[in-house]
Amino acid sequence: MKSEKQQFLGHTGEMLAARLDSPISAPRAYALFAHCFTCSKDIFAASRISAALVERGFAVLRFDFTGLGMSEGEFANTNFSSNVADLVKAAEYLRAEYVAPTLLIGHSLGGAAVLAAAGEIEETKAVVTIGAPAEPAHVEKQFGDNLEAIREQGELEVKLAGRPFRIKKQFLEDLEASTIRRRVEILRCALLVMHSPVDKIVNVDNARQIYQAAKHPKSFISLDDADHLLSKRSDAKYAASVLAAWAQRYLPPADEPEALDDGQIEVVETGAGKFANVVRVGRHLLAADEPKSIGGTDTGPSPYDYLLAGLGACTAMTLRLYAERKKLALDKVSVRLRHERVHADDCSDCESASGQISEMHRDITLEGDLSEQDRTKLLEIADKCPVHRTLENEIKVRTQLVQN
């Protein structure tokens, strides 16, 4: 997965901080994520859901609303309507720089915001809400006893989730003037409502109201005992996996790459960085790159990492096959490797007498009720794994240009 910092102008012309998560191959579609009230793009639920969608070929833009996270602007001057306007600007940014979003996802008040914004983003094919209120004014409950003080004084600093926020009277007035029920009724795309029946921040009855107002196609998924913020890793992962599977029905199918012959591997530059490549091995897609220290973007292992990984995997598999054939009590094999270049004159068992040579260090850990004789034999067998023997044999690499 690639994860890149982005920025774009919000509804007031101030710079909004964003992150674009995307697969190593060309995305099948783009999604836009709206975070919860006073949260940020980096809340765990947002990053987990984004990662799950990327695994299924989607690119996801998540950003901080004006005045929150790393975005510019004053939170006190924002409101629900400004959040909707920021979402529309985010969609415009994707449309101009990449591809317009077809999937909108909103958590808590962000869920109400994507319902309101969907009609203004014509490419929208599907909308997902997570713990969303049926109307924006529901947020007023979070202000408790401070609500009347805000109305009387015009503005007040209140604590939300342990952090101070300045709330102005105009924020309350905008919440009360904003309604999304009518927008849900005329929503012209698929809707997935996700909500926990034990949500203590936004009661599950809000999900019922949203669901009943919407027309088909619509779906509801219970998040069972999850809390409002999906703070448990297992809850966030569950929501992410279900959401990603549901979304695929309403978005373009993934392109099937041309089949490779058995034993073939294809490596293609992604264009995302100087050394970034996508590696296709059968139905598996892998990333290859170099560390940032030498000019790469670190989106995947380096070529030498893959070489060592091949030797390590082959070693473990060979030892497992031998142990099963000989009925040895081998419980687990671990192989740790590293590569370095050394001077030939420092290597007592090397054939080259001068210059530098590659040296691979392989440390093997064997767990189980094994005798010393068993361990000695297994160490001997490790040197007979096919990849090890290939590396020590003479290798010819024959290269040719292929016409497009």
Image (cartoon, grey):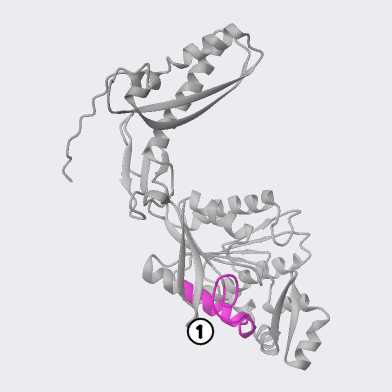
Rendering coords of residue 326 (x, y %): 55, 7
Which stretch is magenta? 65-90
Q: Is residue 144 magenta?
A: no
Residue 26, above or below 283: below
**Residue that label 1 marks:** 12
Above or below, comparing residue 4 to residue 12 in the picture: above
Q: Is residue 192 visible?
A: yes
Who's the residue at 38% across and 36% down the image? 304
Identity of the residue furthest to the front in this view: 345
| Circle 1: element type | loop
Quick check: 312 left or right of 332?
left
The answer to which of 145 and 366 lies nearer the viewer is: 366
Please tell me which residue is depicted at 37% across the width and 23% down the height of the picture: 346
The answer to whether residue 258 shows anywhere in this view is no
Q: Residue at x 48, y 50 (%)?
A: 56
The location of residue 68, given as percent across then percent down, is: 60, 73
Q: Is residue 393 left or right of residue 402?
A: right
